[in-house]
Image (cartoon, rainbow, N blue to C red):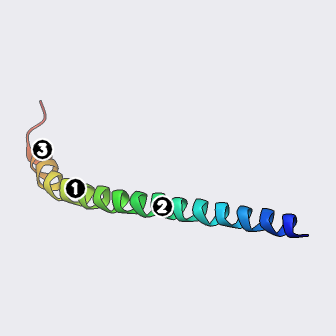
Amino acid sequence: MEERLIELETRLAFQENTVEELNEVVFRQQQQLDRLAEELTRLSTRLRPLLAAADDLPAA
């Protein structure tokens, strides 16, 4: 019985560690996604006037 309890405690500790590591990965990925979304917004804001100006150019 004691051996079984030790095995369960060991598994639980491993799973808790795994969940914590996965949470850290997800957190870092979310930060990265947030930065990419901000950069995409900045690029889109800069590109919009250039596209509008290109639309105003006479066709070649």
Is residue 53 shown above or below 1? above
What's the mark number on residue 54? 3
Badge 1: how crowded within 10 Å, few (<14), some, or many (20+)?
few
Badge 2: how crowded within 10 Å, few (<14), some, or many (20+)?
few
Q: Give the CA separation, mark 2 to mark 3.
A: 40 Å
- The answer to which of marks 2 and 3 sits earlier in the sequence is 2
Task: Between label 1 and label 3, give the one nearer the viewer.
Answer: 1
Q: Amino acid at mark 1?
A: Ser
Residue 26: x percent and y percent?
A: 48, 61
Task: Between label 2 and label 3, give the one nearer the viewer.
Answer: 2
What's the mark number on residue 44? 1
Residue 38: x percent and y percent?
A: 25, 61
Which picture quadrant has residue 2? Answer: bottom right
Determine whether the residue tagged by mark 3 lies in a helix, strand or loop: helix
Quarter of the image where the C terminus is located: top left
**Residues under numbered marks 1 and 3 in contact, where contact means CB atoms less than 8 Å apart:** no
In the image shown, does 17 or 59 lie closer to the viewer? 17
Q: Amino acid at mark 2?
A: Val
Identify the residue shown where x is 17% and y is 59%: 45
In the image shown, does 18 or 56 lie closer to the viewer? 18
Task: Between label 2 and label 1, give the one nearer the viewer.
Answer: 2
